[in-house]
Amino acid sequence: IEMKYHVLTLFPEMIEQGLNTSIIGRAIEKEIIELNTVDIRDYSVNKHKKVDDYPYGGGAGMVMQAEPVYRAYQSIAGTTQKDKKPRVVFLTPQGRVFNQSIAKELAAEEELIFLCGHYEGIDERVLEMIVTDNLSIGDYVLTGGELAAMVVIDAVSRLVPGVLNNDVSAEIESFHDNLLEYPQYTRPEEFEGRKVPEVLLSGHHQKIEQWRRMQSIQRTATRRPDLIKDASLTEKEKKELGL
Ligand code: 6GU
């Protein structure tokens, strides 16, 4: 096992369904990664298994109570590595915005705990007690943290050794020189009158690399101009683009 994830959630089946397919599902089968979901409702202290209540001070919606969340956390705290306490990632629109560099940082851990909230949120006191990292996946509001946890787990898992078929670690990078990827083509050579760019059929590997590099740079400049400042471009490349 290269990476163990624990997900504390009211919707464990959502996490299991979402991650049991394709590449991540295969990595779990191969025991490269392990996924342990913990149903917070199982740790309710209420005879009706209630896990939420009205907010003190009033206001819309319900708040997840501290006790079931804390007990769910304690249930795994005992199973984790002897001396090292794993990071506890709370998925919230109030967190740091997740990116590839945070994915790399998390992929260096051996074990991670994700906490997913629902309703209007979780009682602040348990968050103060257990959360080490607050993460958002972007500036929009989801109904719960589950989809966000799956996004983070997917992005981190593909950086874990052995998860991608891909033997070249360079390919794992995906943001080569902080540029967007170049366009890809496969058979047939012509589709609905649209031809594959000539250079890709030429067999001139150096020309192909040059063409792909220019495509990456042009795409980044037009589609994501905000990324250009962090891209590693040669002086010649900057000049050609008027940057
Ligand atoms: Cl991490 N959670 C929720 N509920 N909404 C979000 C988010 C997270 N990231 C962006 N929107």
Image (tube, rainbow, N blue to C red):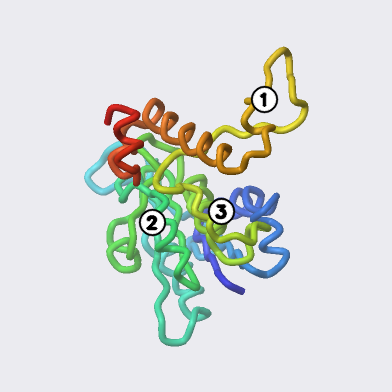
- Three-letter residue code for mark 3: Glu
Give the Cα distance between marks 1 and 2. Answer: 36 Å
Query: Quarter-wise, where is residue 164 in the image?
Result: bottom right
Q: Is residue 157 above or below residue 234?
A: below
Contact between labelled residues 1 and 3, with CB atoms less than 8 Å apart = no
Q: Name the residue under label 1.
A: 196
Packing grade of label 1 (10 A; few <14, some 14-19, many >=20) is some
Tell me where residue 140 appears, x and y as whole percent: 37, 34
- Three-letter residue code for mark 1: Val
The one nearer the camera, 182 or 148, is 182
Q: Which of marks 3 and 1 is nearer the N terminus?
A: 3
Q: Mark 2 points at which residue?
A: 102
Q: Name the residue under label 3.
A: 171
Secondary structure of the residue carrying tag 1 is: loop
Single out the residue that lies furthest toward the right.
188
Instruction: State whether residue 125 appears in this view.
Output: yes
Q: Which of marks 2 and 3 is nearer the N terminus?
A: 2
The one nearer the camera, 113 or 24, is 24
